[in-house]
Image (cartoon, grey):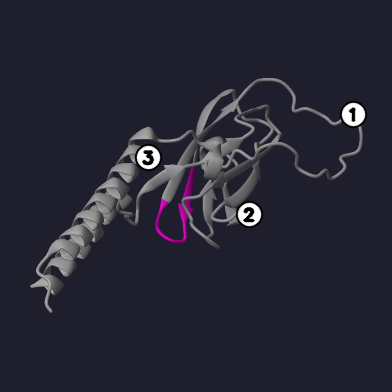
Amino acid sequence: MRPAQLLTGTALTAAVTLLYAGPSYAGETGSLEVYPASVAPGANVTVNTTACGVEGGGTGDAKSLGAGDFDLYPGTHKEVVIGEFTVPAGTLPGTYGIAVACDNGKTANGDLTVTGGAPPSPTHPVQPTHPTGHVKTGVGGSVGPDTSQIAAGVAVLAATAVGGTWFLRRRASGPQDS
């Protein structure tokens, strides 16, 4: 009878853990970070997303503003893919939807605002620079803590600890065979 109780407790713990882990479905929509979010015609725009997964790729769609399709490649950060396109010179001011279709079947969407005026021109030759500051990719520490998920995790751990303690105490105080 004791092995059955042990298996039941293990199965219950696994079920609760999977309940809070959350499912992942193919075809779900993720977010697309567009940088800069507001540009003048003729400017280069970079997009990134985590929807495509580790070592993923995909195709971006900037046809809404006349820029056509662009490719996405794995970035320097795990699970982030990056793509780039140029806003055509004759693009009218407004907000345009940018979409990404990942090779894994997921999609991501974001908005780009095109403002009037000429694109910025560099006052000096463009030199490659090393990145500085925080990277805003939407993963890791860039998002604030989700207190409901933290509370659920603490509850699962507490329930497991209480159940384990109860099981061990019950086993220790049970009938002793001589």
Mark positioned earlier in the residue sequence (1 or 3): 1
Please name the amino acid that badge 3 sits on.
Ile
- Residue 127, placed above or below residue 8: above
Calculate the distance from the C-alpha at mark 1 to the C-alpha at mark 2.
29 Å
Would you say residue 153 sits in the magenta stretch?
A: no
Along the line of sight, which residue is nearer the eye, 175 or 83?
175
Mark positioned earlier in the residue sequence (3 or 2): 2
Q: Secondary structure at mark 3?
A: helix
Please name the amino acid that badge 1 sits on.
Thr
Would you say residue 105 sits in the magenta stretch?
A: yes
Q: Residue at the top extreme? A: 116
Which residue, given by chain and number where applicable, does mark 3 sit on? 150
Calculate the distance from the C-alpha at mark 3 to the C-alpha at mark 2.
29 Å
Which residue, given by chain and number where applicable, does mark 1 sit on? 123
Can residue 74 be seen here?
Answer: yes
**Crowding near pointer 1: few (<14 within 10 Å), some, many (20+)?**
few
Along the line of sight, which residue is nearer the eye, 40 or 168?
168
Q: Residue at x 64, y 40 (%)?
A: 135
Q: Residue at x 71, y 36 (%)?
A: 133
Q: Position of residue 130 (x, y in %)?
A: 80, 45
Report the mark closest to the observer, 3 or 2: 3
Calculate the distance from the C-alpha at mark 1 to the C-alpha at mark 3.
49 Å
Which residue, given by chain and number where applicable, does mark 2 sit on? 75
Please name the amino acid that badge 2 sits on.
Gly
Q: Position of residue 55 (x, y in %)?
A: 55, 63
